[in-house]
Amino acid sequence: TQLLEQSPQFLSIQEGENLTVYCNSSSVFSSLQWYRQEPGEGPVLLVTVVTGGEVKKLKRLTFQFGDARKDSSLHITAAQTGDTGLYLCAGAISVGNEKLTFGTGTRLTIIP
Amino acid sequence: EAQVTQNPRYLITVTGKKLTVTCSQNMNHEYMSWYRQDPGLGLRQIYYSMNVEVTDKGDVPEGYKVSRKEKRNFPLILESPSPNQTSLYFCASSPPNRVGQFFGPGTRLTVL
């Protein structure tokens, strides 16, 4: 089983600050997805990256896939309280979605 | 509204009493999957299905069964639940083009 390690596990910062969350593995993935999960709900897809070195932006969120397709990062600029949640990365080893390996998550709290 | 639904949302049962958690999606997705989420372990895949009558084991299939008789439904069956199956369960679906998965709201199961 491929392992995806996320760091940090917990992060608590003031509103307006910037932050980066990391997702690392020794395995190569064909694609990597980022999800956000709020209490009592299922994960919601934020982005999928498929090309080594790819950078995608979603408003204040910037996602990057490592050149070797083994790691990824999520950078949030000027964090807002609405960014609070559990952030999960998930890697697919094949072209389709069938075998997704999830990281253990980063629990982000934005303090007003 | 496009969605994945799960029932029940909460269930408390006793060891050995067979139960079924239903999952249904209205997006005509080929791919469906079941995960369990446990503290410190993240989301782990139980079973997945690429299409009707096609199912395969994920990372933690022991003690679970699934069936895919119709495209929209993917029930999870616990023939003889045990306390170590106490967990938060999520069903997910996706189309075959690697855009990420749509998750249901979760089923919190407690086995006494």
Image (cartoon, coloured by chain):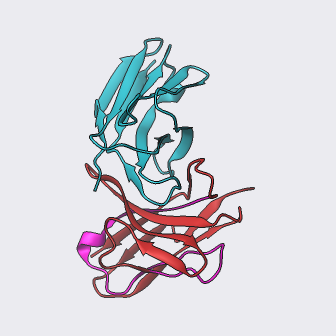
Image location (x, y in percent) of residue B102 = 58, 54
Residue B79, magenta (yes or no): yes
Residue at 41% x, 41% y is: A88
Residue B22 in picture, x, y percent from top left: 54, 75
Q: Quadrant of the N terminus of chain A?
A: bottom left
Whether residue B90 is situated above or below residue B57 in the rendered picture: above
- Provide the residue span drawn in magenta: B66-94
> Is residue B30 highlighted in magenta?
no
Give whichever of A91, A109 is nearer the camera. Answer: A91
Instruction: Identify whether A56 is placed above or below B45.
Output: above
Q: Which chain is cyan?
A: A
Q: Position of residue A32 (x, y in %)?
A: 46, 41
* Above or below: residue B102 compared with residue A104: below
Residue placed furthest toward the right: B1
Residue A41 horizontal/vertical position (percent):
51, 50
Residue A23 or residue A112, whichever sits in front: A23
- Chain with colour red in the figure: B
Residue drawn at x 34%, y 70% as measured from the top left: B110
Image-based side of B46 in relation to B4, left or right: left
